[in-house]
Amino acid sequence: MTESDAIDATVLSGRAMLAGVVGWPVSHSRSPRLHGFWLRHHRIDGAYLPLPVRPDSLAAALRALPLLGFKGANVTVPHKEAALAIVDRASAAARRIGALNTIVVGADGTLEGQNTDGFGFRENLRAHQPDWTPTAGPAVLLGAGGAARAIAVALLEEGVSEIRLVNRTADRAERLAREINGPFQIHRWADRGAALAEAGLLVNTTTLGMTGQPPLDLDLAALPTDAVVNDIVYAPLETPLLAAARARGNPVVDGVGMLLHQARPGFAAWYGVEPEVTPALRAFVLRDL
């Protein structure tokens, strides 16, 4: 599909299936572009809309989804945690993570919350580094925010036996370890280089290295050269961390694939079609980054 095909206007009928993304603000979201590509590719009678919702209106907005005929919605910052307390039920992963990013409206009008960030992380990792295994060695997570929580749960579900949490504030890492409960080890930010010894996977979940943010200062000397390095930042696509890892021979995984794969379960639930992450989709989304 060419870009002109993807942005060609779709004629909607009165039976069009509706979904969208709820956030405040929401103008930065790439989800309408991503889901719009799939809708047009599969010639689905449907639409995916940006839904800017203030925090004090979140409950009313989510409860309005079934009243307005929506099949569901994605939820982005700053609503991911607050939405969990509003939905009628939530997946085990969403409850363990403490946040959701996807809502599916049931046939009876109830709201089911899901968190597909961990799914997106796993599928992206498998797609780009299929030889990585949970037994390759400890996983090192830089950061302890929402993305780190989702990735930690995904790694535990995969069977990783040790996760090293490295965060600029230790108390937040300790809270993650306490609330998720698993084989975590807390390392001080000052010791982040030493925490890489014998690791099989390194994941940066912080904003360090993102365009407009401070750089990630990390010495990779202790990291085995066969360890996979994944940066969930995707602007720039090749972060300084990935460039440094690639230069020393480490296999690397960029962050845009997590964005693409996490969208698959929601699209399938709302529109009844299992979408694929293809080179054409990746190129189409990257043109907007």
Image (cartoon, rainbow, N blue to C red):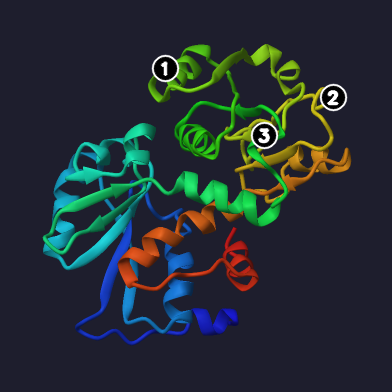
Residue that numbered label 3 is attached to: 135
**Kind of residue indicated by mark 1:** Arg
CA–CA distance between discs 2 and 1?
30 Å
Circle nearer the viewer, 2 or 1: 1
Placement of the C terminus among the 4 image quadrants: bottom right
Around disc 1, counting alpha carbons within 10 Å, would you say few (fewer than 14), some (14 to 19), or many (20 or more)? few
Can residue 35 be seen in the rendering of this structure?
yes
Q: Position of residue 257 (x, y in %)?
A: 59, 55
Circle 1 — which element?
helix
Q: Which mark is residue 155?
A: none
Q: Which of disc 3 and disc 1 is earlier in sequence?
A: 3
Can residue 78 be seen in the rendering of this structure?
no
> Do callouts 3 and 2 mark residues in contact (Cβ within 8 Å)?
no
Residue that numbered label 2 is attached to: 221
Q: Which of disc 2 and disc 3 is earlier in sequence?
A: 3
Circle 3 — which element?
helix
Viewed as shown, does residue 47 lie left or right of 195? Answer: left
Q: Quadrant of residue 274?
A: bottom left
Q: Tell me if residue 194 comes above or below residue 7 in the rendering.
A: above
Circle nearer the viewer, 3 or 2: 3
Residue shown at 55% from the left, 35% from the top: 159
Residue that numbered label 1 is attached to: 178
**Kind of residue indicated by mark 3:** Thr
